Amino acid sequence: MPSTFTQAMRTMSAVADSPNDYVAQWKKRTGRKALGVFPMNFPAELAHAAGVLPVIIQEDRQPITVGRNLLGEFNCGYTRNVADQAALGRLDVYDGFFHADHCIQLLGAIDVVREDASDKPVYFGQLMSSMSDEWAFPQVLGKMEDFRSELEKFVDCRISDANLSRSIDIFDANRRLMRTIFENRRSGDAALTSAQLQVLVKSSMIMDKEEHTELLRDVMGDSSHVPRDDRIRIHLSGHFCHAPKPELLDVIEDCGAIVVDDDLFHGTRYVSTDVGSESNPLEALASVYLRRNTAVPCPTRVQHEVDWDRFLVDSVDASGAQGVIVLMAKFCEPHMLFYPELRKALEARSIPLLLIETEHEGLPMESIRTRVEALVERIRRKQLSTV
C-alpha cells in the first residue's frame, strides 16, 4: 500500500498536471463557482471569502495552434498558451476571470479570453506598480475595495469581514507550511526534489486551500530529513507567471547540481509573505501587496528601498548557493530589461551564473544539459583553485 507521503504527492501531482479536471470535479462536488485568475498578485483570499474557488490559470502542455494566429510570436509562451486555451475552449470550466497585474502581453491574452468568453465576467483591476510613494497604500486599498465589490456582484452576495479574515487565516496557514518546507531545503534537507516542490506550489494555486493544507501535512508528517550530498548548490531565479517544465528541473539536478533556494513564482515568491491578522482585513490585503515586494522584489514593481539584484546576492549568501541559474521566459520584457543588473551584481561578487531562456515548446534539453554540466564543472574548478 502506498505511503501517506506517496498518496499525497500523487494527488497533488494529478491536480498540477490537470487543473481543469480538478476544477470540474470541485464544482460538481460543491455546486459553487470557480474563478480563473491570472498571475501574480490577485488577492485570492477575497474570492475564497466569497465562496468561490480561485484558480491561477496555468500554462498547459498542449502545443500552441490557434493561439499563434491570435498573438504574435514575440509574446511569451505563457500568454500565447493562455490565448490558445481560451480559443479552443479549455478554459470553459471557469465562471469568470479576474486580473490584477499590468503586463501588456498578458492583457493581450486576456482580450482573447474576453472575446471567447463573452458571456462571462472578465475584470481587470490594475494594482499600481510604484510602491514607495506615500499615496501607494491608499491607491492599493481602493483597488482592493473594487475587487471586493466586483466579486460581490459575481456571487450576488456580500463578503463579510469575518469571512475574509477566516480566508486570510486559511491561506496564511497554507503558506506557513510551504515556507517550512522551503526553509528546510535551504538549511540542508534534500528530501524533496525541485520538481516535487514545484508540485506542492502549483497544486496550491489550484486546489481548495484547506484540502491542500491537509495534503501538505501528510507530506510533512510522512517524510524524514535527507542530508544534502556534495552536489553543487544552486539558486534558481526568475520565471514569473508560469512554472518551469519539470523535465528542465530534473535535468539541472541530474547534472550534479542541487537547488537549495529560488525566487520563482512557482516557488518562494508565491509563499513568501503572510497577510496576517488585522482589525481591517481589507487593509491587511493592501499591506501584504506592498510587503511581499519587500520580501521578494519583482522587476515589474518599482520600490526604492529594495532591489532584486541585492536580494539575489543576499539570498545566495544566506543559502550557501555556489551559483545561480536564471530561468528567463523568452520575450518576458521585465526580466529581459532587469537581467543586466542581476548579471552585474553577481559578477561583482564572482558568483557563477548561467542564463537559460525557456519557451512553451521546443526546449533543447540536451543543449541545456551540456550548459549546466559546464557550469557545475566551472564551480568545481573554482573550488579546487581556492583550496
Image (cartoon, rainbow, N blue to C red):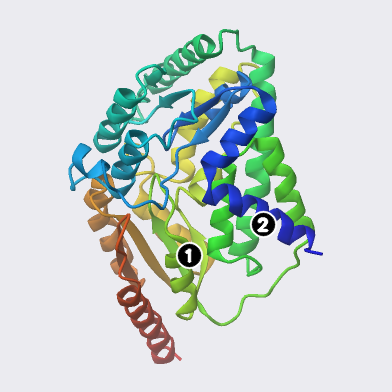
Residue 61 screen position, x and y as percent: 41, 53
Q: What's the residue at 66%, 56% (across, down)?
A: 10
Q: 323 or 221, which lies in front?
A: 221
Residue 55's place in the image compared with 364, above or below, is above
How many residues crowd mark 1 within 10 Å: few (<14), some (14–19), many (20+)? few
- Could one spot residue 23 in this view of the protein? yes
How many residues crowd mark 2 within 10 Å: few (<14), some (14–19), many (20+)? many
Earlier-in-chain disc, 2 versus 1: 2
Say which quarter of the image contains residue 156. top right
Which amino acid type corresponds to the residue marked 2 in the rendered image?
Met
Disc 2, disc 1: CB below 8 Å?
Answer: no
- Disc 2/disc 1 C-alpha distance (Å): 31 Å
Q: Residue tagged by mark 2?
A: 9
Left/right of residue 365 with respect to residue 95 in the rendered view? left
Which amino acid type corresponds to the residue marked 1 in the rendered image?
Asp
Residue 153 screen position, x and y as percent: 50, 9
